[in-house]
Amino acid sequence: MITSELWDALGIPNGWNEYFPKFNKQDLVAVSKNGSTIYFRSCDREGDLRGPNLSWFYIDEAARVSLNTWKIMVGRIRKPPEKGWIATTPKGRNWVWDEFKKRKRNNYECFIGATDENKHLSKEYKESLLESYSGSFLAQEFYGEFTAWEGLVYPQISVEEHHLDAPTDGYKYALAGCDWGWADPSVILIGLVGMDGRIHFVEEYYKNRTPIETIAQKALELREKWDVKTYWCDPSRPEYIQEFRKNKLDSRKGKNEIDPGISSVSRLIEKDLFRADFNQCPEMIREFETYCYSESDQGEVLKDRPIDRSNHCMDAMRYLVYSQQKQGHASSRRGR
């Protein structure tokens, strides 16, 4: 919404009608008095964004759209000034955090402003928000911080507490969890099962648009490296599991119940039996920081509905942990 105060600050007291004498309400296209054309589009239908050749673009509440939308818009820039802007309230550590806060790049800049810096809001209103909000919601909604959101599926995970370099011995056997994809990545996660029941994730394979024959060859390499005993696989593609078996890999259908699987992983973490070498599993920690439950229209976290996004390592991990706990593994060894 462009307020009258903003038009006054821009030196355009009559606002919209003066600066945009032509506006097609049906096509949502405005022509300014200097001849520039502005297209108003929803980001809900990404395909509609691919046509125009643009000088600049602006996305409002960008945390609520996808990374792919951002990439499409960047790709539509064709002429000066070659700029893109977004404005948003943070929404956990999603793609906005990845692109603008976590990654340091010379051609991007990030500005963060807190609600109490807004001079147009009354002191009483700001104080009412401070009384109403608390915890990570306060940090995110009032102070504009990129917090580990309360709706994260695994909020217990932190790099500081759960990172540990891969061991060279002292574990019983190695297992793998596999999630299949094409446009989304296919994933193989290697977990070492310790004498005390700890599972230590030590390596990931994470790649999209890769044929199953190539993935099977990578699985063979990982078996050779880690002496993997069993591959617990996404059961949705039995022909992929069969390809693994053709290559003499012990491949089994993973247990795919989401809620019990998440509970199994959470118990492992709570019992301090989870470790990962995040240097070797960078996509795993990225997904831990973004894998979250959906929200109701009122902003309430729906604990029975994890969002089906940023979950490829999460699914592979769940297949391994839950299936191993349900069925166990007969093989064991003491080191390498």
Image (tube, helix red, strand yellow):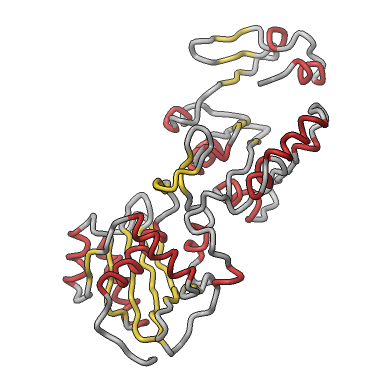
Q: Position of residue 190 (x, y in %)?
A: 38, 73
Q: In the drawing, does residue 184 fall left or right of residue 13? A: left
Image: 63 above or below 331:
above
In this orientation, which residue lies closer to the viewer: 18 or 123?
123
Q: Position of residue 217 (x, y in %)?
A: 28, 71
- Answer whether residue 169 is visible to the viewer in this image: yes
Image: 25 above or below 111:
above
Q: Quadrant of the C terminus?
A: bottom left
Residue at the image position 58 percent from the left and 37 percent from the top: 62
For this orientation, the residue located farthest to the front is 131
Residue at the image position 40 percent from the left and 46 percent from the top: 305
How many callouts does the rendering have? 0
In this orientation, which residue lies closer to the viewer: 304 or 116?
304
Residue at the image position 50 percent from the left and 38 percent from the top: 69
Residue at the image position 48 percent from the left and 61 percent from the top: 283
In this orientation, which residue lies closer to the viewer: 250 or 267?
267
Image: 159 above or below 183:
below
Q: In the drawing, does residue 247 fall left or right of residue 130? A: left
Q: Quadrant of the N terminus?
A: top right
Identify the image quadrant of residue 127: top right
Q: Position of residue 274 (x, y in %)?
A: 47, 73
Q: In the drawing, does residue 295 fall left or right of residue 78? A: left
